[in-house]
Image (cartoon, grey):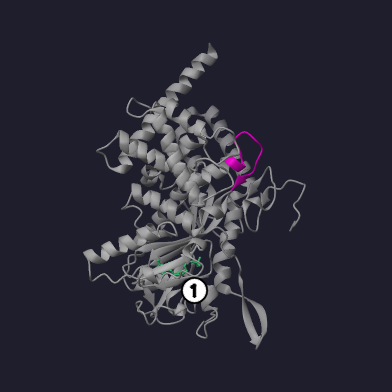
Amino acid sequence: QFPFGRRLPCDIYWHGVSFHDNDIFSGQVNKFPGMTEMVRKITLSRAVRTMQDLFPLEYNFYPRSWILPEEFPLFVDEVRMMKDSDPSWKPTFIVKPDGGCQGDGIYLIKDPSDIRLTGGIQSRPAVVQEYICKPLLVDKLKFDIRLYVLLKSLEPLEIYIAKDGLSRFCTEPYQEPTLKNLHQVFMHLTNYSLNIHSGNFIHSDNANTGSKRTFSSILCRLSSRGADVKKLWSDIISLVIKTIIALTPELKVYYQSDIPAGKPGPTCFQILGFDILLMKNLKPMLLEVNANPSMRIEHEQELSPGVFENVPSPVDEEVKVAVIRDTLRLVDPQKKKRKDIQYNYFMCCRCQALEQVSEAKEEVLEAVPEQDAGRAPEPGLPSLCLKQVFPKYARQFSHLRLVDRVAALFIRFLGVKGTTKLGPTGFRTFIRNCKLSTSNFSMASVDILYIDITRRWNSMGVDHKESGMCLQAFVEAFFCLAQKKYKSLPLHEQVASLVGFCEYHLAALDEKRLVWGRG
Ligand code: ADP
């Protein structure tokens, strides 16, 4: 531990809280800049909402959410409209303060008017979300799943999922929410930190019983009941990949601001904790993403009244030790060297017997994913618990990476490295270079669009540190432009067409500059 930083460079830095714990210029660090901000309840909801606007069916794994205070009137109106169109709809909502964790400050309501206005909603940013009333129950109890996901690299995108996770159980039998039971946290909230205080909490050494179990034990149980566990896993993998695709555009903006291309800096990886709820019909729903999931493998036990002791928790140990061990195996700097040796060997074979090239190449290339897929490459170590899901399944998801391409345009026009917001000149240059200004859309209208959208986003108090247009504001402006230009298409096609149009003009410009340069 180096509480005051360390002068000598390391291969791997394991920060406790965030990327910014210490200044580092080389090696690998276990946090991405901006990840903590990105997974806050409001930011995550916004990022998923953008994807829901583009791909509503693909992103239906996140409950309908409204951001407070700014969307309170919208929340009231939409609920009223839905109730009018379906009088039998008796919804419940869950209110979660932004930046809260461990169930802190969370409560359930039946009507928008029940939102607690203590201190005014103005002072308490929060997300209000449709409550999933029919969760899957095991032993009559509600539970959620904590899955560990390794984001190994942002560019190119590399994602691994741990084969086992934890299931955290409520400690009171579940009943659908009524005005009477709405306040019973041990029935509705699965947080370990809350349920540990219930008299019914069961610490168990066995992975199949107790209030915290392995996810694999739940899968076994579901499989014995005839559930399609393979489909469930594939739905979970989709949910994880799609969520990370929603987060990557902004993460890239943070990344280039903290680690500008061409300057010395570390590369990053991060273990994320995904909290997922299974609905009765086995559909996985995303609850939240944790940038700093607890890696504790002990729990507190009360030996005698008021006397506590830390004792090992076998269930936590089984899951978490494997996640950390395999993360270190995957980011191992020696491994890269071994890959280079394999490649050199392959090049050598190439010279000796050209006709064997294609076979050898396949072997070398396959050797890497095979290792990652679970074989035991290192002697004396168990097979990997982390399974690569991206780029392995990239083809199925590539059409969703549209906002990533919008973010690439945004980053190109940011200008001075180290910023995360686009100034008015940068926005004008973007419009000009991409040939988006027409007789119907003058540069004066461009300025008005910039001012309108930027002012609104800045008034929402997202980030006051810098002035200018943040990525989400740029995305909104981009969607506006796309709708204007390609009127009759669905939104994702409008955006895809405009991205293609901009990329085409920028490539042509780059080509021209290259020719001028040569001249
Ligand atoms: P926190 O970060 O405070 O743990 P979560 O978003 O994870 O906040 O919510 C806490 C708990 O509330 C979850 O573990 C889950 O049991 C329950 N919960 C959260 N959102 C929903 C929802 N939309 N429907 C049903 N239960 C939910």
Q: Residue at x 39, y 73 (%)?
A: 221
- Looking at the image, is 455 positioned above or below residue 5? above
Residue at horizontal 43%, vertical 29%?
431
Residue 154 seen in render: no
Q: Is residue 204 above or below residue 146?
A: below
Which residue: 53% across, 69% down?
A: 102
Location of residue 142 in the rendering, given as x and y in whole percent from the top left corner: 41, 75
Tag 1 residue:
213
Label 1 Cα neighbours within 10 Å, binned few <14 / some 14-19 / many ≥20: many
Whether residue 196 can be seen here: yes
Can you give x and y, in whole percent of width and height, for residue 360 in the image?
Answer: 49, 37
Would residue 92 appear left or right of 323 to someone viewing this image? Answer: left
Give the residues in magenta. Answer: 257-268
Identify which residue, 12 or 18, lies in the foreground: 18
Q: Is residue 446 magenta?
A: no
Label 1 beta carbon less than 8 Å to ligand 1 = no
Count of marks placed on residues: 1
Amino acid of disc 1: Arg
Label the magenta part by its dominant secondary structure: loop
Query: Residue 381 or 205: which is nearer the viewer?
Result: 205
Q: Residue at x 35, y 68 (%)?
A: 279
Mark 1: which secondary structure? strand
Q: Is residue 292 above or below residue 368?
A: below
Q: Is residue 311 above or below residue 347?
A: below
In which quadrant will I find the N terminus?
bottom right
Ligand 1 shown in quarter = bottom left
Please state the horizontal and vertical placement of residue 122, each as a whole percent of the image: 49, 61
**Percent position (x, y) of residue 262?**
62, 33
Q: Quadrant of residue 358?
A: top left
